[in-house]
Amino acid sequence: MEQKEKALVVGVDLKGEIDFEYSMKELVNLAEADDIEVVFEVTQRLDKINTAHYLGTGKIEDIARIIDEKDIKTVIFNDELSHTQIRNLEEKLACRVIDRTFLILEIFERRAKTKEAQLQVEIATLQYMLPRLMGLGKSLGHQGGGSGVKNRGSGETKIELGRRKIEDRIIILKKELEVLVAQRKVQRRKRNRKDIKVIALVGYTNAGKSTVMNNMLNLCSQPEDKKVFEKDMLFATLETSVRNIVLPDNKEFLLTDTVGFINKLPHHLVKAFRSTLEEVTEADLLIHVVDYSDPMHATHIEVTNKTLKELGVVGIPTIYAYNKIDLVESEEKKEEEGCAYISAKNNIGMDKLLTKICEQVFADYISFKVLIPYDKGSMVSYLNENANIKSISHENEGTLISLECRKSDYEKYKQYEI
């Protein structure tokens, strides 16, 4: 069994931050998601960050001793470091130094499967590197030889790419990405013409968005290969997945699963993934999935809403799906209009969530009766497949149908209304 890379995590608590301990715990989870074993943690309370070394010199000496004793190869800092800080720290500690941003970029690089995600991650990584070329020594050299940023030229490691090469590479990658973005826009236009509602799952990483999607796919008996990857870890899903959900009453919508957000999500990454997240900006409804069992879930909601706002996602109706209620000790849960308490994994409350979704996106559905002449049999077939048929009977003049359907279909068939 391959031995994991050992690391020490470091954080500065500025004037007693409320969520500092949680942020450090999250950093450890991020390291685990990158297959790194955290063996020690060092924190220091300061009034301000040391511009040269991030920490005080005495604390750096302590870390150097721990590194030596425990044979640690990597030190991970909980904030984004400048190139000066990285260079100075690597000189003092004689090991690989990375920050929270670079760690998240590594995780994204490891998980990116589609061409679009790979391009987005490489663009974000190169943009992160540009101002840090002077400082990124061991941290970049570690990436060479087979691993590291995909789509790279022949055997170039990050450290060998000069500023000009990086800038040229970013231009090439952005052009490649534009082609894929244009294809996605064409797909969206086709969907808009069909008048199908789009619902986007958003939320903090590991809140359970993919589990919610798979539960919905189960409801409409979709085959296993339509299901999306789900796992209890940070950033299990990077790719945007779109699935067609057809309910038993023939109501239909597209459900989009998106990348999760996290506190201190690298700005470059948000910017690079903007094209993927355009699916969210054009949604008719957002399902904001919240890990209700996490004591910091209120902060997760704030972080997600703030990130959505940065992406230009405003004014879209939202349902809050408080997930993992099976892990919360029983308490009075106030059923409010814009929220549902669920356990997607255990299929608790999903029916209520679905009811709330239907109330929101199918509010414009129209109920009426039509009498379709017998020589228009194809119309009856269409309505059977695309409308909610409440009753059907065969009269002398034709087929009498009581139904509920979207407004666009009503416009097509209202001439037969009785």
Image: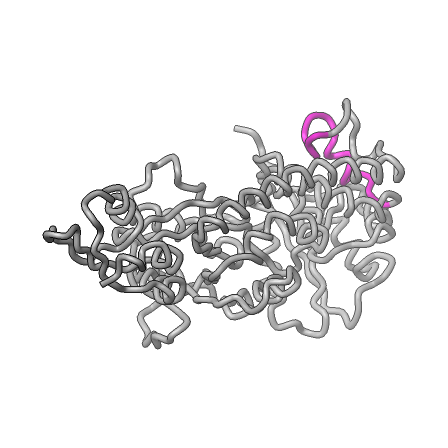
Span shown in magenta:
135-151
User: As drawn, is 77 to the left or to the right of 107?
Assistant: right
User: As rendered, which of 407 and 259 lies closer to the eye?
Assistant: 407
User: As rendered, which of 346 and 186 lies closer to the eye?
Assistant: 186
Above or below: residue 55 compared with residue 149: below
User: As drawn, is 41 to the left or to the right of 1?
Assistant: right
Q: Residue at x 51, y 45 (%)?
A: 190
User: As rendered, which of 317 and 206 lies closer to the eye?
Assistant: 317
Question: Which is the main secondary structure of the residues drawn in magenta?
Answer: loop
Above or below: residue 150 compared with residue 361: above
Q: Residue at x 29, y 53 (%)?
A: 387
The quarter of the rendered structure image containing the C terminus is bottom left
Residue 271 in percent (x, y) is at 70, 52
Residue 132 in percent (x, y) is at 84, 47
Residue 174 seen anywhere in this rendered image of the structure: yes
Q: Residue furthest top?
A: 154
Residue 85 in percent (x, y) is at 84, 53
**Is residue 143 one of those drawn in magenta?**
yes
Q: Residue at x 79, y 69 (%)?
A: 48
**Is residue 147 one of those drawn in magenta?**
yes
Q: Quadrant of residue 96?
A: top right
Residue 393 in percent (x, y) is at 12, 53
Q: Residue at x 80, y 35 (%)?
A: 169
Q: Quadrant of residue 155?
A: top right
